[in-house]
């Protein structure tokens, strides 16, 4: 049976990790996978996470199963982090959350849930979107279509085109939006644009799925969720897929959540039963460690304050690098304008260079960026920024 299989190309993002590891050039730079790095190029465990892990090691009393929805306190804390403590949907008891293995796990739960709601649903994603979105929804048997989003020419948004397309999406379909720090472009909707999308969703009756994997990396925990919170206050139904990989630095612990908001409490209970049945059929129940860490941090004022500070530090470093990178590239690359890098948010921006130039960066300079020209700004440091900007100048000359 296996001999009929055809080999598949490596994942466009994760494949770069292996290639970077194998590269022996001591000047190599990894701007590929979306992992935060400090000035030393490391991704250390956050101090708040270490403290929570110490607490867990000392206080954990059992390894027994935790149940389909995972850690219920974690689920409640995540709802509050995402929506704010007093969101009308929470006060009306319309939200149900299942802990999930990472952002990707939560998306897969959402995909199967959507299929149970409407087998014929089309999921609409931004052009472009995170490389894994399309294959993930297609793997679940859903149709995927794209709507205009990033303006490659002007390095902004194609908002009018987006509105035109979304105004034709029918009820029964799902529109995926990135809450903040759009992956891969870094170009976000402003609040007025979120309001417009909420209006269209109400008129058309489609369901929105908000993918929020970078809360706190854009402007602040609250501002990064402002569009999501507004949308959740306007529509009857919403799906939220969240991840603690980046903002808690818990990448390999695979911790995220799938939250479903329904029109009333009774429908929410039914939706929850379907979501938990989906969970049972995929992985039965989630692993405990990451959720315990997040719950321990969010249950302690001291650890929460420590985490906020660490998150603020990560965001400030990225924003500082955005402005430095813009200056260096504008300085060294004659006739090119990289000022858009400063206007965008989160870890990613497109450099806007072509395939051949991207390949030259890798082959001649050991600089690894995704084939779409997406760079992880956090991978730049004061030590390597000149080397990087010189290399971009050389390949674009
Ligand atoms: C990324 O976009 O680089 C991250 O979300 C990691 C991944 O799984 O692709």
Image (tube, rainbow, N blue to C red):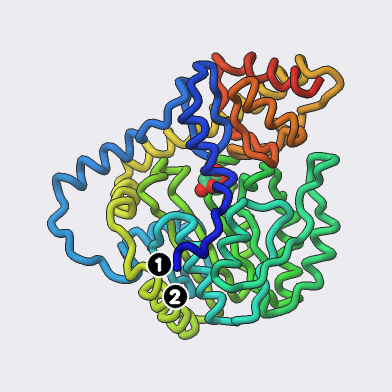
For residue 362, the mark is none
**What residue would you read off at disc 1?**
98
The residue depicted at 54 percent of the width and 29 percent of the height is 30
Q: In this view, does 356 lie to the left or right of 291?
A: right
Q: Residue furthest front?
A: 3
Ligand 1 near label 1 (Cβ, under 8 Å)? no
User: How many numbered discs, if any?
Assistant: 2
* Earlier residue among tags 2 and 1: 1
Q: Is residue 191 left or right of residue 15?
A: right
**What residue would you read off at disc 2?**
275
Locate the C terminus and report the quarter of the image it occupies. Answer: top right
**Mark 2 → mark 1, Cα distance in angstroms:** 8 Å
Residue 191 lies, in percent from the top left, at: 70, 52
The residue depicted at 39 percent of the width and 44 percent of the height is 250
Nearer to the camera, 201 or 87? 201
Secondary structure at badge 1 equals: strand
Residue 23 lies, in percent from the top left, at: 50, 25
The residue depicted at 63 percent of the width and 15 percent of the height is 387
Residue 272 falls in image quadrant: bottom left
């Amino acid at each position: 049976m296996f001999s009929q299989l055809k080999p598949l190309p490596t994942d466009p993002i994760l494949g770069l990790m292996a290639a970077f590891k194998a590269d022996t050039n001591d000047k190599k730079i990894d701007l590929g996978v979306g992992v935060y790095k400090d000035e030393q190029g490391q991704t250390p465990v956050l101090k708040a996470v270490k403290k929570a892990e110490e607490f867990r090691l000392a206080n954990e009393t059992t390894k027994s199963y935790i149940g389909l929805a995972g850690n219920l306190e974690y689920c409640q804390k995540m709802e509050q982090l995402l929506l704010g403590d007093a969101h009308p949907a929470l006060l009306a008891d319309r939200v149900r959350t299942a802990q999930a293995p990472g952002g990707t796990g939560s998306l897969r739960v959402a995909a199967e849930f959507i299929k149970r709601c409407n087998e014929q649903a089309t999921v609409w994603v931004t052009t472009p979107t995170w490389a894994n979105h399309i294959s993930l929804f297609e793997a679940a048997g859903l149709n995927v279509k794209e709507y205009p989003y990033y303006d490659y020419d002007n390095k902004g948004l194609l908002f009018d085109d987006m509105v035109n397309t979304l105004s034709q999406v029918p009820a029964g379909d799902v529109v995926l939006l990135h809450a903040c720090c759009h992956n891969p472009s870094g170009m976000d909707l402003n609040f007025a644009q979120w309001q417009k999308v909420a209006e269209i969703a109400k008129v058309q009756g489609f369901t929105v799925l908000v993918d929020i994997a970078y809360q706190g990396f854009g402007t602040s925990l609250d501002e990064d969720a402002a569009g999501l919170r507004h949308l959740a206050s306007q529509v009857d139904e919403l799906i939220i897929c969240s991840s603690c990989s980046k903002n808690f630095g818990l990448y390999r612990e695979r911790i995220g959540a799938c939250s479903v908001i329904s029109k009333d409490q009774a429908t929410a209970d039914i939706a929850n039963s379907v979501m938990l049945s989906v969970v049972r059929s995929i992985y039965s129940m989630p692993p405990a460690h990451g959720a315990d860490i997040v719950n321990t941090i969010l249950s302690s004022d001291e650890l929460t304050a420590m985490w906020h500070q660490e998150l603020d530090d990560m965001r400030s470093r990225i924003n500082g690098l955005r402005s430095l990178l813009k200056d260096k590239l504008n300085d060294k690359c004659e006739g090119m304008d990289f000022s858009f890098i400063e206007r965008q948010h989160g870890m990613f921006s497109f450099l806007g260079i072509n395939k051949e130039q991207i390949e030259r960066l890798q082959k001649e300079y050991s600089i690894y960026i995704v084939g779409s020209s997406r760079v992880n700004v956090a991978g730049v440091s004061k030590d390597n920024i000149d080397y990087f900007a010189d290399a971009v100048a050389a390949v674009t000359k």
